[in-house]
Image (tube, rainbow, N blue to C red):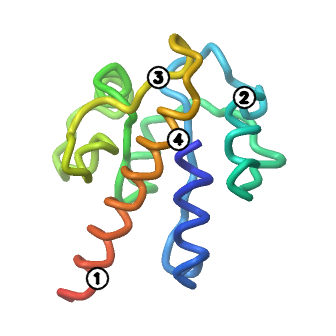
Amino acid sequence: MAEFVMKDLVAKAGREGDFYIESAATSTEEIGNSVYPPARRKLAEHGIGCAGKTARQMTRSDYARFDLLVGMDDWNIRNMRRICGDDAEGKICKLMDFTRRPSDVADPWYTGDFEATWRDVLKGCQGLMNSLTQQAAKR
């Protein structure tokens, strides 16, 4: 969900050329599957598409490929560190750390509450976008 929310925010800001956004799983359960149907429906409610996306496994090389690696919860962060090794460049962070309420993103896998997840993801992505915009302005 976060990949497509972030892409939508970037597009609305007219900054598609400034970002490359791609999600990857930190576990193997969903590899090769498309976006989970309730998540796809929640995105569609907000006019956001996700057609063609299939889950892929995060790899160690992603650490070098991306400027930032954003996890949704503590479990993701642990797995990201396990996959990538040392985070010497401080690239690994949690999405909700970009909000006034640092925490885990509500996990709909267990609760079925995709609205709560939507709200967390939207707030986190908006906070991340603001942070990146402020960093760019300082350069």
Given residues 33 and 36, the one toward you in this image is 36
- Whichever of labels 1 and 4 marks the residue nearer the N terminus, that label is 4
In the picture, measured across the screen, residue 126 lies left or right of residue 131, that is right
- Image coordinates of residue 69 in percent, x first then y, are 37, 47
Q: Residue at x 38, y 37 (%)?
A: 71
- Whichever of labels 3 and 2 marks the residue nearer the N terminus, that label is 2
Residue type at mark 4?
Answer: Trp
In the picture, measured across the screen, residue 90 lies left or right of residue 28, that is left
- Whichever of labels 4 and 2 marks the residue nearer the N terminus, that label is 2
Which dot, 3 or 4, sits closer to the camera? 4
The residue that mark 1 highlights is 136
In the picture, measured across the screen, residue 130 lies left or right of residue 2, that is left
Residue type at mark 1?
Answer: Ala
> Circle 1: is it few (<14), some (14-19), or many (20+) Cα within 10 Å?
few
Which dot, 1 or 4, sits closer to the camera? 4
Dot 1 falls on a residue whose secondary structure is: helix
The residue that mark 2 highlights is 38
- State the CA–CA distance, disc 4 to disc 2: 11 Å
Q: Residue at x 42, y 36 (%)?
A: 60
Marker disc for residue 25: none
Which dot, 1 or 3, sits closer to the camera? 3
Above or below: residue 67 compared with residue 105: below
The residue that mark 3 highlights is 107
Q: Are marks 4 and 2 in contact (CB under 8 Å)?
A: no
The residue that mark 4 highlights is 118
Residue type at mark 2?
Answer: Pro
